Image (cartoon, grey):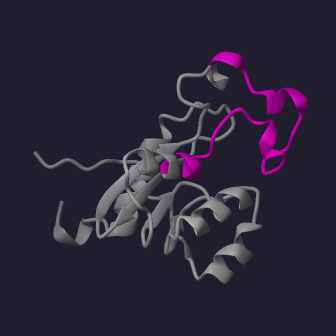
Amino acid sequence: MTKAERPDLDEYFLKIAAVVAERATCLRHHVGAVAVRDKHILATGYNGAPSGLKDCLELGCLRDELGIPSGTRHEICRGIHAEQNVIIQASLHGVSLEGSTIYCTHSPCRLCAKMLVNARIKRYVTYGKYNDDAFNDLFEEAGIEFATNERPPEVVSFKD
């Protein structure tokens, strides 16, 4: 791989978020999030049931069974969003997310946006869109920079 082919930091961390999403246990969306500050990964999170509890892979999707559209009625879902889990993982390890950038495979829902505002992140970068745009006004008011980039390549380049 030449220096010109080297991914920039946003592409690099978005690709890591995509790999984190592979651990998701949601049947509808696989979402991954990575919290980064000063080029250092602080925490990761993916969407799924609370730790140690049965997940949708085992139980099925209640939202699908009830015909609930994506982006609505979050309280029905058994899962915790990737952004919520990245905040929880950071707090479990005594790590502040203040001033960090969240790289996530999807844009946030309004509930996650409120939590991220309170976590005092400075930037949110994604390549995917969730069915909820209500986060925009919160991020704007809080001064959180929001960027939508291209989806990173799914290929991992190795040099032997």
Where 16 falls versus 52 (above or below)? Answer: below
Q: Quadrant of the N terminus?
A: bottom left
Horizontal and vertical percent position of residue 153: 41, 55
Q: Residue at x 63, y 24 (%)?
A: 55
Locate residue 38 relative to residue 123 in the image: left or right: left
Where 78 falls versus 127 (above or below)? Answer: above
Query: Which residue is farthest front?
Result: 94
Q: Is residue 110 magenta?
A: no
Horizontal and vertical percent position of residue 137: 73, 77
Q: Magenta part of the protein: which range? A: 58-86
Query: Which residue is farthest left?
Result: 160
Residue in front for this viewpoint, 105 or 91: 91
Horizontal and vertical percent position of residue 21: 50, 42
Locate residue 64 relative to residue 136 in the image: left or right: right
Where 76 falls versus 156 (above or below)? Answer: above
Q: Quadrant of the C terminus?
A: top left
Residue in front for this viewpoint, 71 or 151: 71
Q: Residue at x 48, y 37 (%)?
A: 22
Q: Residue at x 84, y 45 (%)?
A: 73
Q: Residue at x 78, y 45 (%)?
A: 74
Query: Which residue is farthest top?
Result: 58
